[in-house]
Amino acid sequence: MMVPLNPSAKPTSQRRIAEGDNVVVYERHDAMRAVTVRAGGVLQNRFGVFRHDDWLGRPFGCKVYSTGGGGGGGRGGGKAGAGFVHLLAPTPELWTLVLSHRTQILYIADISLVVAYLELVPGCVVFESGTGSGSLTTSLARAVAPHGRVCTFDFHEQRATSAREDFERNGLSSLITVAVRDIQSEGFPEEQRGAADAVFLDLPQPWLAIPSAGITLKQDGVLCSFSPCIEQVQRACEAMRSCFTDIRTFEILLRTYEVREGALKGAADDEECNAGPLPHKRRKLLPPAKTSDGIHNPSSVMVRPCSTAKGHTGYLTFARLRVHGG
Amino acid sequence: MISNHYVHTFQNRDGASGDTIVEALIANSSTFGKKTVFSQEKYKLKKQKKYAPKVLLRRPSTRSICETYFKKSPARTGFMRVDALSLLLSMANVGPYSDVLVVDMVGGLVVGAVAERLGGTGYVCSTYLGSAPSSIDIIRMYNLSSDMTSRIVQAPLGDLCSLQNSFNASSVLKDSIQAEGPEPNTVPVENTEPSIPQPVDTTVLDEKAQSSEVQPTNIDISEPTMDEQINQDDNSSLDCKGNDVSSIASKSLRAGKAPSPEKMKYWNEHGFSSLIVAAPGHEVESFVADLLPLLSYSAPFAIYHQYLQPLAACMHSLQVSKTAIGLQISEPWLREYQVLPSRTHPHMQMNAFGGYILSGIRIHNGDACNGIQ
């Protein structure tokens, strides 16, 4: 269960792996996958063959080894059975990284800003359209749990079904209702008028849904519209001006840094500008670099930004429903 | 053009309304007519802001509290921008029934935010080095209900660690730990609120202090029921807030109690479900090395800092010791836009720095054999 819903359900990381559990298999920082543990089940990857039976009873966060017959392992290749992976308890963050993409998804930077600006706390009711692959939906569920509600809509029947299955698998069905509906043309259901503390829109033409969002929101409720293109943002803001106030638009990105231990060369050293091996995640303490004149430069931990980064995801526009008489 | 002196006379003597003044300014301005439509709009808004200010009352939230401190006194909150705080909460998987370990040296901003997200379930254990906790006054801005504030406990790091060490030393000693557990209320109640800005009736404070010393035992007994009666909505917190100074004082005293021995034992056996560190002026490498063993395996952590080198050193030592995976240092970048017809562009001024975050997941370090342990 990704989000505990009652006091007896301890957060998953505090108990042992059992059959039927979902685990996130961490192979490398950029290679993870979700696996449902089954008796007799087997996972095969670049590090070897892993038997699910070996995982039962182990704590989440443990390291498990392949049973041999595998290729180069996590440490020094070639040795059979030396491959290992870590088994992690799924969280909404990990889920975002391992879920199957049926659509473009939202990542942690946008997700965390949305949850904060929508002012979601346990007990809130939040409406979302479209569901997409359920990346944001999962985080919304955590934010409003255990007694809040997420009502999510997608016009694509198959995607809605896949999302529903994912939520079921992750134990979130009691928090999330998925419905097939074209919000752009039909709006939110009339019977949900005034039901929402917050509304989130990720639609190609959000301005069509904004009046209905205004009706569905409680007074002083918060709306968020996510759009990749600035033209969409302009039209959405235009549509918001009559019923909404405090309209603010942001973009958020994450810059990541890489860390490496090494020593920079002194002035008298080789001209070559290559400063040592390329950084990688698995690390041992390196001996201090030896310079050309035999003097050891003390090695230190050096840090610099990663060269790859996302340039853009989308613009986030937040607004509050105007309070009458205010 | 109307002179400033004239406007003041207008305001004070004739008691003219702000809107009237603005209209008069516009009517008497020699340059107004020559301005473009956009410029006129801008001029009018500027004058309105000065002479006809409107005040809106808004309910506080993590977002608004963080933004306000960031704008007005960022040094107090370690220059933590809203997006950085939001990331900390997500990265640390703060949700219902979590036991979140927090090191908050940003005035209570993080403790309050975590308590808000817990919604009256789980616990936020605010830990500190040394004998006295740092101020977490800011939690009073959050309008937390009494359920939520009761979830905030404080315990010195020494207590949490020593319990762990004695547990690890021998399982035979396990029973004796129950007998000689840490004293409840080692931290005197007065210390949890070292500086209270508004004047508080000291007799009220003393009364509350006396009665609260008895409370820990009562809370232990009613603990199971507290887990069950979940605080539904923050709407209830809206009722019990505001001008009552004594209620504010008592609420802050309710928060920050020492955890019960039962709770300490539970955390010692199971570990905390996540960790957030916000000590932007401190060296973190050794701090984190002491904190990580207090987490359960597969528990995520997020460490905020103003400076990059301490996080780099910390990340490197975690990589070497292999006690954590999924390590990443992130720097959030946030830009706000002005969206107006034919005038859409990012704001001309932006904030360039909101902090760095080191995130990761604690794992079991040590070679495990195949098969069930």
Image (tube, rainbow, N blue to C red):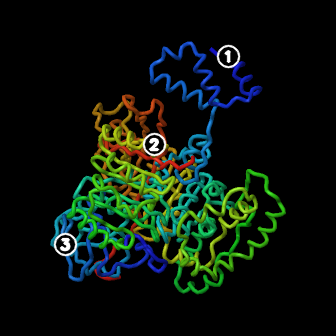
Task: Find disc 3 in the rendering and name its residue.
Answer: A49
Q: Quadrant of the N terminus of chain B?
A: top right
Q: Amino acid at mark 1?
A: Ser
Q: Residue at x 48, y 31 (%)?
A: B349
**Image quarter of residue B5:** top right
Whether A136 is drawn above or below A305: the answer is: below
| Towards the viewer: B295 or A205 | A205
Q: Could you tell which of marks 3 and 2 lies nearer the N-terminus?
A: 3
Task: Find disc 2 in the rendering and name its residue.
Answer: A247
The image position of residue A126, as x and y in percent, is 42, 60
The image position of residue A109, as x and y in percent, is 39, 50
Q: Residue at x 43, y 58 (%)?
A: B90
Task: Find disc 1 in the rendering and name its residue.
Answer: B3
SS for callout 1: loop
Q: What's the distance in space between the residues labelled 3 and 1, CA to CA?
A: 84 Å
SS for callout 3: strand
Q: Amino acid at mark 3?
A: Val
